[in-house]
Image (tube, rainbow, N blue to C red):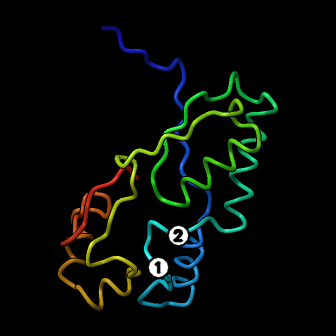
Amino acid sequence: MTDRWPARLWIVRHGESAGNVARDAAYQQGLARIELTGRDVDVPLSPLGREQAGALGRWFAEGNEEGRPNVILCSPYIRAQETARLFREAGGCPPGTRIHLDERLREKEFGILDGLTGRGIRADFPQQAELRESLGKFYHRPPGARAGAT
C-alpha cells in the first residue's frame, strides 16, 4: 500500500472570532472573565474574521500561490467551519471541494480556567496560575482540560 502525501500543505487557523474580540475587550478593560455566551465550539467569526477568510480565498483564486488546495481538513468548531466555507466560496479551492471535519483539530480546552483572563486565573486559581507560569501556557493542563491542535 502506498500512502499519498500532498506536494504542499497549507495550515490556516480560523479568522478572527467573536471570542477573540471578547478576549481582547476583557483584557483592555482589566476584567477577570471573558464575556461569552454559549459554548466555545459555537463561537462564530467576527465580521473581520469573515472578511479575512474571504480575502484568503480570493488571494488563492487570483493565483498568488501555485495551485489551490484540493482537500480541506477542518476543526468541528463553528469559526473554523465558517473560515473553510468562506475560503471555498471566495474561490480559494476548486468548486465542490469537500470540507472534512476532523475532531483531532479541535481547539485546546482550558478546563476550570475556561473563560478566564490572566487576572481571573490569578484571582480564582492562584496555584494554577503558578503552574501555568512555570510550565508555560502551552504545556500547562489545568483540571478538566484537553490538549488540542492549536
Could you tell me residue 119's position as x and y percent?
38, 86
Q: What is the tally of numbered marks visible in this picture?
A: 2
Residue 111 vs 127, above or below: the answer is above
Residue closest to the far top: 1
Residue occupied by mark 1: 38
**N-term mark: 2 or 1:** 1
Q: Are marks 2 and 1 in contact (CB under 8 Å)?
A: yes
Residue 86 vs 67, above or below: the answer is below
Residue 96 vs 21, above or below: the answer is above
Q: Which mark is residue 43?
A: 2
Looking at the rendered structure, the kind of residue marked 1 is Gly
Could you tell me residue 134's position as x and y percent?
22, 67
Horizontal side of 40 relative to 59 (left or right) equals left
Q: Residues within 10 Å of mark 2 (few under 14, many from 20)?
A: some
Could you tell me residue 114's position as x and y percent?
35, 76
Taking the spot 27% from the left edge, 90% from the top edge, the residue there is 124
Looking at the rendered structure, the kind of residue marked 2 is Val
Q: Residues within 10 Å of mark 1 (few under 14, many from 20)?
A: few
Q: Which mark is residue 89?
A: none
- Secondary structure at badge 2 equals loop
Name the quadrant of the N terminus: top left
- Residue 68's image quarter? top right
Taking the spot 31% from the left edge, 83% from the top edge, the residue there is 121
- Secondary structure at badge 1 equals loop
